[in-house]
Amino acid sequence: MIVTTSLSRRGLARASGGLLLTGILPICDNVSDWGRKLHGRGADRFERAEEFNRGVAAGLYRDPRDLLYQAGIVAQLGIGAYLLELGASDDWCRQRIGQFVDKALAIANQAGLNHLEPGMAELVQLLSPYGQWRGPFATDLPAIEAIDPLRVSAALQDLLATVRCRLDGQRIGARAR
Protein backbone atom coordinates (compact mmCIF):
# COMPACT_ATOMS: atom_id res chain seq x y z
CA MET A 1 0.00 0.00 0.00
CA ILE A 2 1.29 3.47 -0.91
CA VAL A 3 0.50 6.42 1.34
CA THR A 4 1.01 10.07 0.43
CA THR A 5 -0.13 13.24 2.13
CA SER A 6 0.17 15.27 -1.07
CA LEU A 7 -2.27 15.01 -3.94
CA SER A 8 -0.12 17.23 -6.12
CA ARG A 9 1.29 15.68 -9.27
CA ARG A 10 4.73 15.77 -7.66
CA GLY A 11 3.42 13.95 -4.57
CA LEU A 12 1.69 11.36 -6.70
CA ALA A 13 4.81 10.79 -8.76
CA ARG A 14 6.91 10.41 -5.58
CA ALA A 15 4.48 7.69 -4.49
CA SER A 16 5.97 5.55 -7.29
CA GLY A 17 2.98 5.99 -9.53
CA GLY A 18 0.76 3.69 -7.47
CA LEU A 19 -1.87 6.35 -6.98
CA LEU A 20 -1.69 7.33 -10.63
CA LEU A 21 -3.29 4.02 -11.51
CA THR A 22 -6.37 4.90 -9.47
CA GLY A 23 -7.14 7.87 -11.71
CA ILE A 24 -6.39 10.61 -9.18
CA LEU A 25 -5.13 13.12 -11.68
CA PRO A 26 -6.32 16.70 -12.10
CA ILE A 27 -8.05 17.58 -15.35
CA CYS A 28 -5.77 18.47 -18.26
CA ASP A 29 -2.80 16.75 -16.66
CA ASN A 30 0.17 16.19 -18.89
CA VAL A 31 2.79 13.74 -17.67
CA SER A 32 5.43 15.32 -19.92
CA ASP A 33 5.20 18.56 -17.85
CA TRP A 34 6.54 16.92 -14.68
CA GLY A 35 10.19 17.64 -15.40
CA ARG A 36 9.65 21.40 -15.80
CA LYS A 37 7.90 22.09 -12.50
CA LEU A 38 9.04 24.53 -9.88
CA HIS A 39 11.13 23.50 -6.89
CA GLY A 40 11.29 25.12 -3.48
CA ARG A 41 9.04 25.82 -0.52
CA GLY A 42 6.19 27.25 -2.58
CA ALA A 43 6.27 24.77 -5.46
CA ASP A 44 3.56 22.38 -4.25
CA ARG A 45 1.26 25.24 -3.29
CA PHE A 46 1.74 26.89 -6.68
CA GLU A 47 1.02 23.59 -8.40
CA ARG A 48 -2.27 23.31 -6.47
CA ALA A 49 -3.15 26.87 -7.51
CA GLU A 50 -2.68 25.88 -11.14
CA GLU A 51 -4.81 22.76 -10.65
CA PHE A 52 -7.69 24.74 -9.11
CA ASN A 53 -7.33 27.36 -11.83
CA ARG A 54 -7.93 24.77 -14.54
CA GLY A 55 -11.52 24.45 -13.34
CA VAL A 56 -12.02 28.22 -13.34
CA ALA A 57 -10.47 28.58 -16.81
CA ALA A 58 -12.59 25.71 -18.15
CA GLY A 59 -15.78 27.45 -17.00
CA LEU A 60 -16.81 24.69 -14.60
CA TYR A 61 -18.36 27.15 -12.14
CA ARG A 62 -21.58 28.59 -13.50
CA ASP A 63 -22.89 30.01 -10.23
CA PRO A 64 -21.10 33.31 -9.50
CA ARG A 65 -20.68 32.38 -5.83
CA ASP A 66 -18.93 29.13 -6.74
CA LEU A 67 -16.76 30.99 -9.24
CA LEU A 68 -15.70 33.58 -6.67
CA TYR A 69 -15.02 30.95 -4.01
CA GLN A 70 -12.82 28.96 -6.40
CA ALA A 71 -11.12 32.15 -7.60
CA GLY A 72 -10.32 32.97 -3.98
CA ILE A 73 -8.73 29.58 -3.52
CA VAL A 74 -6.62 30.01 -6.66
CA ALA A 75 -5.48 33.50 -5.69
CA GLN A 76 -4.71 32.55 -2.10
CA LEU A 77 -2.75 29.45 -3.12
CA GLY A 78 -0.78 31.40 -5.73
CA ILE A 79 0.05 34.29 -3.43
CA GLY A 80 0.74 31.86 -0.58
CA ALA A 81 3.27 30.03 -2.76
CA TYR A 82 5.16 33.27 -3.22
CA LEU A 83 5.07 34.07 0.51
CA LEU A 84 6.23 30.55 1.43
CA GLU A 85 9.13 30.88 -0.98
CA LEU A 86 10.14 34.09 0.80
CA GLY A 87 10.20 32.28 4.15
CA ALA A 88 6.71 32.81 5.59
CA SER A 89 5.21 29.81 7.35
CA ASP A 90 1.73 28.35 6.93
CA ASP A 91 0.92 29.42 10.48
CA TRP A 92 2.05 32.97 9.81
CA CYS A 93 -0.11 33.16 6.67
CA ARG A 94 -3.10 31.64 8.45
CA GLN A 95 -2.85 34.00 11.43
CA ARG A 96 -2.09 37.24 9.58
CA ILE A 97 -3.90 36.76 6.29
CA GLY A 98 -6.56 34.08 6.62
CA GLN A 99 -8.95 34.21 3.65
CA PHE A 100 -8.32 37.87 2.86
CA VAL A 101 -6.89 37.87 -0.65
CA ASP A 102 -6.59 41.67 -0.65
CA LYS A 103 -4.37 41.54 2.43
CA ALA A 104 -2.30 38.67 0.98
CA LEU A 105 -1.75 40.54 -2.28
CA ALA A 106 -0.79 43.74 -0.46
CA ILE A 107 1.77 41.89 1.69
CA ALA A 108 3.17 40.01 -1.33
CA ASN A 109 3.42 43.22 -3.35
CA GLN A 110 5.32 44.91 -0.52
CA ALA A 111 7.63 41.89 -0.49
CA GLY A 112 8.45 42.22 -4.21
CA LEU A 113 5.68 40.45 -6.11
CA ASN A 114 4.67 43.75 -7.76
CA HIS A 115 1.47 42.44 -9.26
CA LEU A 116 -0.44 45.67 -9.78
CA GLU A 117 -2.87 44.61 -12.52
CA PRO A 118 -6.17 46.55 -12.34
CA GLY A 119 -8.21 43.40 -13.02
CA MET A 120 -6.77 41.66 -9.98
CA ALA A 121 -7.07 44.79 -7.82
CA GLU A 122 -10.79 44.83 -8.66
CA LEU A 123 -11.22 41.09 -8.12
CA VAL A 124 -9.54 40.96 -4.69
CA GLN A 125 -12.14 43.38 -3.35
CA LEU A 126 -14.83 40.78 -4.13
CA LEU A 127 -12.77 37.86 -2.88
CA SER A 128 -11.95 39.14 0.59
CA PRO A 129 -12.65 37.04 2.51
CA TYR A 130 -13.34 34.43 -0.13
CA GLY A 131 -15.05 32.09 2.36
CA GLN A 132 -18.02 34.46 2.39
CA TRP A 133 -19.16 32.97 -0.93
CA ARG A 134 -19.78 29.65 0.81
CA GLY A 135 -21.56 31.25 3.77
CA PRO A 136 -25.24 30.84 4.61
CA PHE A 137 -26.00 34.57 4.43
CA ALA A 138 -25.96 34.99 0.66
CA THR A 139 -28.69 37.64 0.78
CA ASP A 140 -26.34 39.93 2.73
CA LEU A 141 -23.69 39.82 0.00
CA PRO A 142 -23.34 42.33 -2.83
CA ALA A 143 -25.12 41.67 -6.12
CA ILE A 144 -22.85 39.50 -8.26
CA GLU A 145 -24.93 38.65 -11.30
CA ALA A 146 -22.62 40.66 -13.58
CA ILE A 147 -19.44 38.69 -12.83
CA ASP A 148 -17.63 37.96 -16.08
CA PRO A 149 -16.00 34.52 -15.79
CA LEU A 150 -13.56 35.37 -18.59
CA ARG A 151 -12.31 38.46 -16.74
CA VAL A 152 -11.97 36.47 -13.52
CA SER A 153 -10.01 33.78 -15.36
CA ALA A 154 -7.79 36.36 -17.09
CA ALA A 155 -7.02 38.10 -13.77
CA LEU A 156 -6.07 34.78 -12.18
CA GLN A 157 -3.94 33.76 -15.17
CA ASP A 158 -2.04 37.07 -14.92
CA LEU A 159 -1.53 36.59 -11.19
CA LEU A 160 -0.22 33.04 -11.59
CA ALA A 161 2.07 34.14 -14.43
CA THR A 162 3.55 36.85 -12.19
CA VAL A 163 4.00 34.43 -9.29
CA ARG A 164 5.63 31.81 -11.54
CA CYS A 165 8.00 34.44 -12.90
CA ARG A 166 8.95 35.54 -9.39
CA LEU A 167 9.37 31.96 -8.16
CA ASP A 168 11.63 31.19 -11.13
CA GLY A 169 13.52 34.45 -10.52
CA GLN A 170 13.95 33.72 -6.80
CA ARG A 171 15.61 30.40 -7.61
CA ILE A 172 17.77 31.85 -10.36
CA GLY A 173 18.84 34.70 -8.07
CA ALA A 174 19.65 32.29 -5.24
CA ARG A 175 21.79 30.09 -7.51
CA ALA A 176 23.73 33.09 -8.84
CA ARG A 177 24.88 34.09 -5.31
Image (cartoon, rainbow, N blue to C red):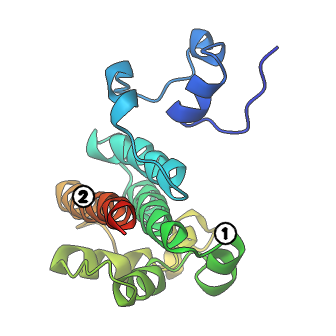
Q: Amino acid at mark 1?
A: Asp
Q: Secondary structure at mark 1?
A: helix
**Is residue 142 at all visible to an observer of this figure?**
no
Q: Residue furthest right?
A: 1
Which residue carries the number 1 mark? 90
- Label 1–label 2 contact, CB within 8 A: no
Position above or below: 52 against 8: below
Which disc, if any, is residue 161? 2
Q: Residue at x 51, y 58 (%)?
A: 42
* Residue under the image location 55 percent in, 58 percent down: 41
Residue ID at (57%, 63%):
134
Mark 2, other Cα within 10 Å: few <14 / some 14–19 / many ≥20:
some
Question: Which one is in front, 57 or 176?
Answer: 176
In the image shown, does 106 or 67 lie closer to the viewer? 106
Residue 53 percent coordinates (x, y): 36, 48
- Residue extending furthest toward the top: 21
